[in-house]
Structures are given as C-alpha cells and as structure tokens.
Image (cartoon, rainbow, N blue to C red):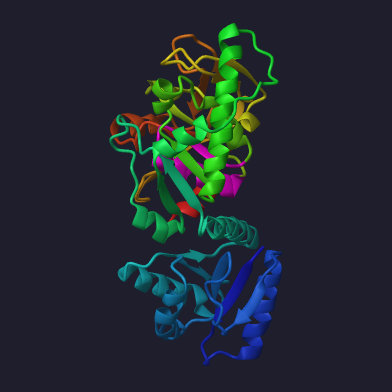
Amino acid sequence: MNIAIYTLTSELHDELVVSAVTQDFLGSLGIEYDFKGNDYADYGCHALDLLYVRTGGTEGIFKQLLPNLKAKSATPFYLLTSGKSNSLAASMEILSYLLQNGISGEIIHGDPAYIAHRIALLAKAGEAKLQLKDCRLGIIGESSDWLISSHADKDIIKERLGVELVDIPMRELLDTIAATPLRQADEVCSSEAIRKALPGALQIYDALKKVIQRHSLHGFTLRCFDLLGTVHNTGCLALAKLNAEGIVAGCEGDVPAMLSMEIAQVILGVTGFQANPANINPETGEMLFAHCTIPFNMVEHYEFDTHYESGIGVGIRGYMKEGPVTIFKVSGDLSRSFIQEGELIRNQAKPDLCRTQQVIQLSDPSQTSYFLNNPIGNHHIILPGHHQELLNSIIQK
C-alpha cells in the first residue's frame, strides 16, 4: 500500500534507544511503508501519511510544522504512537490543539493487530480519495422536479473530493439518441411488448455511451423520466448495463445518490443499487427497498418487465444474493452521511412496486428513526457486504 511514515522526536531523548523502539514497534505491525523520518518534502502525496510521534516533548515541533503540513494536504492528521517515551501524552496534546483550531485528526494507538487493521483501512480509503481526484460526473438534464432536496454544492464537492460536476442539457442526449441507429437485441423476451421496446432501450444505452465519451465522464445521473414522453422508452436497461461496466449511472438526476455510488465504486468496485424505501417497520427494523433498475453485476439473475410507473419501456427485476448488505448515502454538501449494515433477507416481485424489490433487515432496528425523522432524500444505495467501517473512513473530514 502507498503508506508513508514521518517522525516527530524530541532531542532530549536518546536516539539509539528511540531507534530501537521504532524498529521493534513498526516491525510488529507487519505492514509495508516508506519511512521518511523528519523529511516532510513529499508529505500529502500518498494514500496515507502517518505522523509517528516517537517521544514526548514534540508538541512544539509539531506546532511549528503545522502550517507547512496543512498547506500540503487537506486530509486529517493521523498520529501514530507506540505509547513509549510519553508519546501517547504528546499525541493527545497535539490532537487537542488540532481540534481547538478546527482541524481533524486521530490518534492511532493500541495493540499491533488493531493498529495494522486501522492503518490498512485508512490506506484503502486514501487510495479511493486519490482515485476520486479529477473525476468528472455528469448531470444530464438536471434533477427531477420532485427531488427538491437532492442537489449538491459543486464547490464543496470539488474541494473535498476533487470531483467535478458537469451539467449536460437533456437536449444533447435526445439529439444523440435520434442520431443513433436502432439495433436488435440478443435477449430472449417472454413479452411481445418488451421485445418491441428492447431496440429503443439499447439505443438509449448506445447514445449515453457517446455522451460519456464526449464529455470524458466517469459517471452520470440522468433525468430519466423525461425519456418517457420524448422517446417513449426508459433508461433502466442502459443504467443496468453501464453500472455493470463500472460507469456510475444514477436515476432521476439525483446528485447525492450519484456521489454515493461513485464513492462506492472506487472503494468497493461496485456502484450499488439506487433504490427508495417503500415500507418500513420501525419496531423490527425490516425495510423494503425498490427501483426499476439494478446493476447486472450485482444480481444472480434478472428478468425484463415494463417500467412500473409508466408501464412502458424496459425495466429490470433483479434478484441479488441474500446476505449482508450496507445502506449508504451522503448529502450533497458532504456534511452528513448515513451508513447502516443489515441483511438482505429476501427478494420479491410484487406487481404494485418498482420491479427490483429487496427486503432488508437492519442490524440496528433503531436506525429506522433516521428514515422517518432525518433522512438524506429518498434514494439510498444498497451495497453487497458489510462496509460501515470502510465507508466511514473515506467520508470523514
């Protein structure tokens, strides 16, 4: 992993003794790292930069270094300590000073197994942040009119994540669809209506690929309901295919949902299932999530159906493997997030809901209060596996 370790050492301590402790301590962690010592020239250039507070009496040294280090990196300060030679006490004084000045940080201290696990987690999150830098995400056709809270602060997104949000008129996509030839589908269809709709659904997919290439996008969110009245089809199939290809493709112009999917993609390699809660049991923590598309690489098998609300086009009914899941969402200004683990206990296929339907049991039933009292919009991202600790690491300030 791309980890660098820098040191803070008081001149009052015997360097031979400190070096011996350093060798034993870092060796016990069993991690790969670049040891930089007190040379801070490339601080901020790695997935994870650790300040190894080797001794006490280093608080003043750090205070002098702080302006230069802060100018090099906007990430939190991670203070590594063995606890030897009053290093923990010094780390606590340093962290207290950082917090007093509105600067985030963390002391990494404990037994070697805990420290190694925490470092690996932070390094993985750091790698993801490096991947997010200079990422371009498109907003095709603005947010849907009903998403009155699901917008984003472009400046904060750029500053915090390095992600650029690009506005693309819906007219550009519609013109691209019109200029894209129809092609026959290879899929076997049980319905004549679906068979007739598939060429148009693939045309939307082909057109979106052209828009992605034209604007050098890593992903996008689409004001997809506009397609119903213009091309009389849906984007559900296109989004399912593009997400499976690693291109974040969100629904309804929901920018916070798209950001959540992009974070998931870079850190987990899967974009996630964008869905909205359809039913919540506050007493048991059981929830029903539904939407008309899901990435093909997230499901064991799928079926074609019409889009639920309109009854036209091609919708996706996907069946994801039952087991551990994580529900994830960040707000459009990155000031809030929701991360909760649970279990997908069954897929269902009721006719009066969006086509992909997942019944999820929250690990902590009390977390249903978030959805009913303080939600971040309606759409949330369902991810296979338990990832709360890792996602927390990447979104912390």
Residue 375 in view:
yes
Residue 384 in view:
no
Which residues, given as a range, are shown in magenta?
A: 246-268
Q: Between residues 190 and 182, which one lies in front from this camera angle?
A: 182
What residue is rendered at 32% in x and 33% in y?
147
The quadrant in which the N terminus is found is bottom right
**Residue 247 image position (x, y, % from top left):** 57, 42
Residue 124 to residue 41: above or below? above
**Residue 5 image position (x, y, % from top left):** 60, 74
Magenta region's main secondary structure? helix
Residue 209 to residue 227: above or below? below
The quadrant in which the C terminus is found is bottom left
Residue 76 among those drawn in magenta: no
Residue 257 to residue 136: above or below? above
What residue is rendered at 63% in x and 29% in y?
296
**Residue 333 image position (x, y, % from top left):** 34, 50
User: What is the quadrant of residue 353 in the picture?
Assistant: top left
Q: Between residues 297 and 74, which one lies in front from this camera angle?
A: 297
User: What is the quadrant of residue 198 in the picture?
Assistant: top right
